[in-house]
Image: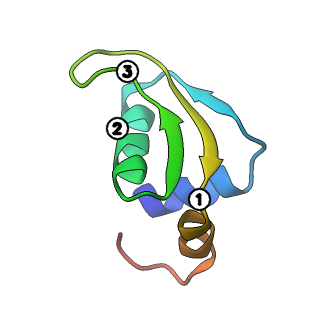
């Protein structure tokens, strides 16, 4: 679930680089929701994603009780 992934990111130093497709897809969701800032590979192309920042909204969401995004 992207919110659980967001919580994990919030507890780690940034930037972080991800190579696996599942993580990159979760990061795409978080970027679309404006919860993180990241560089992503073009859609449909495998590659790395680098999360550089958790936005203020992302920090608030990460610390909120568990609820769907």
Marks 2 and 3 sit apart, C-alpha to C-alpha, by 10 Å
Q: Is residue 64 above or below residue 43?
A: below
Left or right of 27? Residue 57 is: right
Give the numbered dot on residue 37. Answer: none
Q: Quadrant of the C terminus?
A: bottom left
Q: Which mark is residue 25?
A: 2
Is label 1 in contact with label 3 (beta carbons under 8 Å)? no
Q: Secondary structure at mark 1?
A: loop
Q: Which residue is mark 1?
A: 55
Which mark sits nearer the N-terminus, 2 or 3? 2
The image shows residue 61 at horizontal and vertical percentages of 53, 73
What residue is drawn where x is 34% and y is 38%? Answer: 25
Left or right of residue 36, residue 63 in this image = right
Q: Residue at point 34% right, 51% down?
A: 32
Q: Is residue 17 above or below residue 23?
A: above
What's the coloring here? rainbow
Judged from this view, the residue extending furthest toward the left is 44
Label drawn at residue 41: 3
Mark nearer the N terminus (1 vs 3) = 3
Q: Judging from the image, what secondary structure is the residue with disc 2 in?
A: helix
Q: Earlier in the sequence, mark 1 or mark 2?
A: 2
């Amino acid at each position: 679930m992207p919110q659980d992934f967001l919580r994990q990111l919030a507890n780690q130093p940034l930037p972080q680089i991800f190579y696996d497709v599942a993580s990159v897809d979760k990061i795409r969701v978080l970027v679309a929701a404006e919860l993180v800032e990241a560089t992503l590979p073009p859609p449909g192309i495998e590659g790395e994603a680098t999360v550089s920042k958790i936005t203020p909204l992302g920090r608030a969401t990460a610390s909120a009780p568990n609820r769907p995004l």
